[in-house]
Structure formats: structure tokens, C-alpha cells
Amino acid sequence: MSVPLRSGRSTWRRAATVVLAAGWNRPSPADFRLLLLERAPNQRFMPGAHVFPGGVLDAADSSADWLRLFAPRHTPSRFGLGPAPPQHPSFPGLVHDNAHAGALPDDVALRICAVREAFEEAGVLLLRPRDSAPASPGPGLALSPPPGLADWRSRVRSDPRCFLQLCEHLDCTPDIWALSNWGGWLTPYGRGTRRFDTTFLLCCLRETPPVDPDLTEVVGYKWLSPSEATERFLSKEIWLAPPQFYEMRRLETFDSLSALYRFSSDHPLEITEKWLPIVLLTADGSINLLPGDELYVKDSDFLEKPMSTDKKTEELVKEGKVVNRMVIHSLYHYELYVSLLSKDKLVYPKNYVVNKSLPAHL
């Protein structure tokens, strides 16, 4: 295998995404649905894709001004979140352009970012009254939308510092305690020079909150189960980027909201690893290699370069013994090959292979 060279360095930006899972009482394969937002076709990054709510970390998300809002019930440095998550070494050679050295710990700032973006994009308020007692275990509820939602959202979109003003106006804090670690993804080579180091957070709600797309970044939305999202993707009704597709397949291993909530709550510090897919160009396609795969090499060379081989995709699939990879056949045709066993601290998706003679084969 060889590694073609590429000139220039990528610009890395830190971001946060919230996987919003809500209870669903109607007959279905699972008793929860996931919120997917349809990005506007004019967006620079993933135009038209269906994504989880989220966006780029802003300096306002780690401002010292948040300290007075969390006080007196919640105080630094952990604000009641428990022990700090372990610091996994980042991918060699990765340097951020917006590593804000704010007053808040990184994981607190990223939670505030995710809550802010859920409000900006979808009008969903993951807030908690300041004087409320600690929430009882189990999925919670989003705050009912306040009067003047559109005006507040316009202000926050123009200046993220206004999100703190909204929280002060409502006498609430971002419900950072309702968000659990769910790992993260780094944009692989080939998606342009604007790339993201994105923390994924999970929030379980008892029921679906009202959703109001901003009609700027987001033009529509859907509440779908993981299996429904996969089916809509295969039928080309929606488009999922590879990380969202992989996460859908992981989430489908949970048959209930309570099981998903229990898993994330039982392992608050373990589900923190972020994955950078390494692109392997084959003679007739490409494969995204993920950590744990026998061909995966965590080396700074692969920040800006793909691997390449003269072998065909099918050869590599047949040869693979220890695998965690996604074969990219086309825009709407992915396959997953995973031989790694799920453990208490990490759930892997099952293999997913599309049978060409049938709509899909799981």
C-alpha cells in the first residue's frame, strides 16, 4: 500500500453534536426515535444531509459569565458532572484552530455548545430551571418553548453570547447533566480543508419535543428509528454521511429507550474515544478504516493523505480477519464489516451488507 501526497494542511475546528433520542408510543421496531435535521442545500458542509443537531464551538460557550448562572447550586470545576473524563491522546499531528482557553472545562463548554445548537437549529431547549433539584434518574423533558422564540433565536444566531442572556431571562441553565458522552468523529481526508473534531453527546427524553427548523441552516426534520433511517437512506429519501450511518447501526442494537439510557448512564466516562476514519483507496472504490481494524494505522501521515492499494475492494473484504470498516460503494450505498465484539463500555454495529438482488440484507 502507498500513500499519495497532498499539499497544505487542514483547518480543524472543534464541534459538538447531540444525538437526541425520544420516547415513541406508536407501534414500531423500537420505542424511541432520533431527531434528524435536514441541512439546507446551500450549506458549505454536507449540504442536504440529514444530521443530528450540532455545530462549531464558540468562545461564548466557555465564557466565565456562565459561572454566575450556574451558581450557587452548581460550582466549578465539574458543576456536578462527576469526575473528569480521561484525556485520550488526540490523533498525532492534529492541531485545532479554535482551542478556546475559557473558564469552563472542555466537556462543559462542549455540552453548552450542543444545547445552544439544538436551540438555534431546531428550537429545542435542553434547559433546566436554576433552582430545580437534581433530576431523578431516567430520560427527562425539554423545556417548553418560551414566547418570542423566533426573536431569541435570531439574536443567538447573530451572537452566541445571547444564549446566556436567554438562559438568564428564563432563569435556567443548559441541562448539561442530561447529556452523556457518546464518543466522537473527526472529518476524514477528502472532505475539503475545513474539517471538524466533533464530540458526540447523547440525550434521552421521555417524549418528543416540538421542533421548529430555523429555515436557514435547517429546512426540515424527521423523527426516525435507527432502522427507519437506514431504510430511508437506502431508498434515497434521505442522505446520511458515513459517521451518521455508522451511529445509526450502533443505535439499532438497543431495542428500547431505557436500555439506551441505562447503557450511557452506566458508562459516563468510558464512551469518550473519537474516531478518525482513514480512507483506503482501492482499485475500484474506497474503504473507511476505523480503529481496531487490522489495516488501521494511527499515524500523522493519514491526517492529510489516504492509503491506496492495487487490490480491489472485494479482495480486501474477503481477506479481512479483524475488521472495523465501512465500504463506500456510492453516495447511497455503504456496507459495514465489523468483527470486533461489543463490550460493556463500547457497542459496535453488526455487519451490514447490501444484497444486490434484494433491497437490503442485514
Image: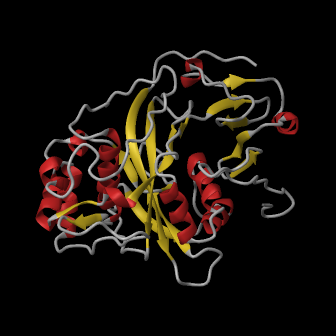
Expressed as whole percent of the image width and height from the top left, the position of residue 133 reads: 25, 69
Q: Residue furthest front?
A: 83
User: Residue at the spot x=29%, y=44% of the render?
Assistant: 109
Position of 100 compared to 279: left or right? left
- Residue 36, percent from left and from top: 48, 62
Q: Position of residue 207 (x, y in %)?
A: 43, 77
Q: Quadrant of residue 145?
A: bottom left
Residue 72, percent from left and from top: 14, 56
In the rendered image, the quadrant that contains the C terminus is bottom right
Note whether 306 is above or below 327 in the view shown.
above
Q: How is the image coloured?
A: secondary structure
Q: How many marks?
A: 0
**Is residue 224 toward the left or the right of residue 58 in the image?**
right
The one nearer the camera, 207 or 122, is: 207
Residue 248 vs residue 358: left or right? left
Which quadrant: the N terminus? Answer: top right
- With respect to residue 331, does 221 lie above or below? below
Residue drawn at x 73%, y 54% as measured from the top left: 350
Tell me what residue is drawn at x 62 percent, y 79 percent: 28
Residue located at (83% from left, 34% from top): 316
Q: Is residue 287 above or below residue 254?
A: above
Q: Residue reaching furthest bottom?
A: 26
Q: In the image, 194: left or right of 282?
A: left
